[in-house]
């Protein structure tokens, strides 16, 4: 059974709507970070404060610049879409620009969008559609090696860390594949499986399909989702953890947060608690599971304070601690290879 393959026509522009919180623009920001060479710019509506650092374009100027796709770069709670964003999407489709989105709802169900796409000859590409026939999880031990990124919260660096670990393993000449589990990761990689769109009974089976048997020295670096203490999204975290049966995991954390983003009444749990719970749950299918590092998202920490902060977390956890974007994941990969030396 193959994973979902998504074709995003290049070059593209990212649509950021009028969002004011980076947390809900992680798709657009991630695409710009990892596929900058394919991105012409961003389309933002009045009131938007999130900025991906690329040129601001209108639909007309995007078309004139040669844009072939408009990628929906925001992910609101529940995967919906504000009605006042629709005219911009319809204008893009009518201009012949493909609309690519990873919402839970289907693009063709949005009022007037299918008709606009038909007029313009544009495609409506839904990323959050799992393949049919996914199995129930078996718990069978599979060959090969697996690393999963987990988090203290959502949108704290799990995708970026997984991409960085995969890239570092490849740089060192080792066998590795990035296994995308969310809309942004799938768009970046061109394939993957949208784990949060899978019916709950089949999430562990989907994770098994995503990371099948492989060579004994091959790493599948699996993009994590949700958070194990998250009151809204822990179910996808647990299913992915049990199904991917990782040998190793990295905890991702935003040190500026004190509560779950969007759930201000839920305090953030510590890294130590996340490590303990991840091992407890993950040991169901892999009793040898272990933590090999901590990845901090220090983008909102003053530059002069980052090194001391990273060092503090290193001393507190006794684990390699890095910011994957600021200084790479070399120390984590060093620990990984030490732990799993053949």
Image: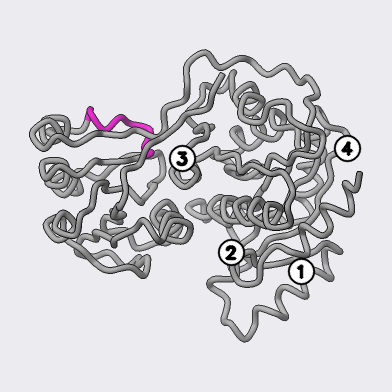
Q: Which residue is mark 4?
A: 288
Q: Are marks 1 and 2 in contact (CB under 8 Å)?
A: no
Quadrant housing residue 22? bottom left
Q: Residues within 10 Å of mark 4 (few under 14, many from 20)?
A: few
Q: Position of residue 203 (x, y in %)?
A: 60, 25
Q: Which residue is mark 2?
A: 257
What is the CA distance from the residue labelled 3 to the residue labelled 1? 34 Å
Mark earlier in primary sequence (3, 1):
3
Kindly identify which numbered label has been placed on residue 190. 3
Kindly identify which numbered label has been placed on residue 271. none
Q: Nearer the viewer, mark 4 or mark 3?
A: 3
User: Is the N terminus in the top left, top right, bottom left or bottom right quadrant?
Assistant: top right
Which residues are the magenta region? 102-109
Decide which of 70, 256 is in the foreground and name it: 70
Q: Position of residue 125 (x, y in %)?
A: 31, 34
Mark earlier in primary sequence (4, 2):
2
The reply to whether the magenta stretch includes residue 197 is: no
Q: Are marks 4 and 3 in contact (CB under 8 Å)?
A: no
Q: Which residue is mark 1?
A: 313
**Which secondary structure lies at badge 3?**
loop
**Which secondary structure lies at badge 4?**
loop
Residue at 18 percent of width and 36 percent of height: 122
Residue 242 in the image: above or below residue 292: above
């Amino acid at each position: 059974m193959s994973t979902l393959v998504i074709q995003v026509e290049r070059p593209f522009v990212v649509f950021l709507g009028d969002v004011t919180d980076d947390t809900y623009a992680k798709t657009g920001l991630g695409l710009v970070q990892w596929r900058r060479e394919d991105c012409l710019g961003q389309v933002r509506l009045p009131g938007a404060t999130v900025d991906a650092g690329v040129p601001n374009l209108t639909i007309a100027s995007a078309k004139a610049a040669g844009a072939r796709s408009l990628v929906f770069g925001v992910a609101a709670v529940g995967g919906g879409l504000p009605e006042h964003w629709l005219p911009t999407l319809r204008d893009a489709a009518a201009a012949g620009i493909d609309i690519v989105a990873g919402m839970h709802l289907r693009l063709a169900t949005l009022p007037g969008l299918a008709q606009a796409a038909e007029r313009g000859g544009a495609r409506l590409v839904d990323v959050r559609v799992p393949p049919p026939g996914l199995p129930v999880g078996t718990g069978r031990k599979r060959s090969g090696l697996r690393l999963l990124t987990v988090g203290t919260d959502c949108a704290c660096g799990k995708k970026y860390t997984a991409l960085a670990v995969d890239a570092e393993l490849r740089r060192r000449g080792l066998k590795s594949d990035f296994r995308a589990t969310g809309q942004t990761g799938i768009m970046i990689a061109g394939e993957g499986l949208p784990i949060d769109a899978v019916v709950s009974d089949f999430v562990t089976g989907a994770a098994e399909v995503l990371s099948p048997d492989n060579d004994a020295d091959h790493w599948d670096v699996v993009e994590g989702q949700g958070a194990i203490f998250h009151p809204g999204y822990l179910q996808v975290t647990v299913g992915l953890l049990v199904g991917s049966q990782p040998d190793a995991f990295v905890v991702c954390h935003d040190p500026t947060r004190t509560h779950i983003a969007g759930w201000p009444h839920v305090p953030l749990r510590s890294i130590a608690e996340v490590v303990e719970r991840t091992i407890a749950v993950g040991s169901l299918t892999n009793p040898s599971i272990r933590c090999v590092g901590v990845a901090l998202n220090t983008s909102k920490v003053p530059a002069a304070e980052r090194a001391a902060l990273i060092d503090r977390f290193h001393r507190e956890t006794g684990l390699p601690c890095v910011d994957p974007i600021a200084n790479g994941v070399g120390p984590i990969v060093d620990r990984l290879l030490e732990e799993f030396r053949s």
